[in-house]
Amino acid sequence: MNQALNIKKLGANGALPLRLGFNGAYFDFDVIGGPFDVYKPGVNGDVGICVREERAPKTADFILPVRDFSVPKDPRLVNHVLERAIDALLDGKRVYVGCMGGWGRTGLFLAVLAKAAGYEDPVAYVREKYTARAVETDEQQEYVSKFDVSAIRSYLFWAAWKKRWLNTLFWWR
């Protein structure tokens, strides 16, 4: 059974393929997205990121409180959660992002992550690769376009180079 079928079977909406890194230090990942209530640690993800304000679950490793059909209020918290997602991916962990339905707020977070990874039109990319329903409102789309990813891009650059350097140094592991 292929990964797409496994993801659907687990209740997720899909997976967003991402290439993280720069200048020869690239790593390819799939970030799983869907309703957070179906997230089971170790089954459909190793790190759970909940992007909803209501009913914050105890199974979430990170919570980014966002009201339904809205956007995050604290860009510093967004950057923090993005960094943790990047760390988890580079450490070989599966990341699951979810809200209530796994469309709007989940798509918004995935689009900001795609923007940080360097995708030129992150909303279009997420809608094409994850789901056409991602980033549901004009406010969410504007948030993605205006979100400053310079700090997280710098973090991503160094984290990817560190990972590449360690892989080269300890090639036998």
Image (cartoon, grey):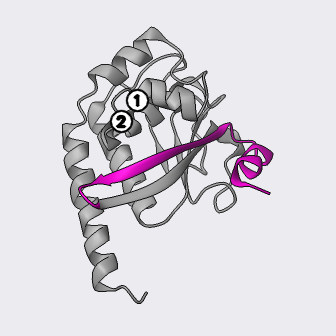
91 is higher (above) or lower (below) than 154: below
71 left or right of 146 in image: right
Front position in the image: 54 or 44: 44
Q: Position of residue 38 (x, y in %)?
A: 72, 44
Q: Please, which residue is most extreme toward the front here?
A: 24
Q: Is residue 19 visible?
A: yes
Assess whether mark 2 and mark 1 are in contact (beta carbons under 8 angstroms). Answer: yes
Q: Describe the element under mark 2 as helix, strand or loop.
A: loop
Q: Position of residue 85 (x, y in %)?
A: 42, 51
User: Which mark identifies residue 122?
Assistant: 1
- Where does residue 98 sit, x and y in percent of width and height? 58, 38
Q: Which residue is at 47% across, 24% downward?
A: 124
Position of residue 136 in the picture relative to residue 121 (left or right): right
The amino acid at mark 1 is: Pro
How many residues crowd mark 2 within 10 Å: few (<14), some (14–19), many (20+)? some
Location of the N terminus (image quadrant): bottom right
Badge 1 element: helix
Q: Residue at x 23, y 54 (%)?
A: 157
Q: Is residue 21 above or below residue 75?
A: below
Q: Position of residue 113 (x, y in %)?
A: 39, 39
Residue 162's mark? none
Tell which of 41 and 13 is nearer to you. 13
Q: Is residue 81 above or below residue 99?
A: below
**Residues shaded magenta:** 1-24
Circle 2 residue: 119
**One can see residue 52 in this view:** no
Q: Could you tell whether 69 is left or right of 26 in the image?
A: right
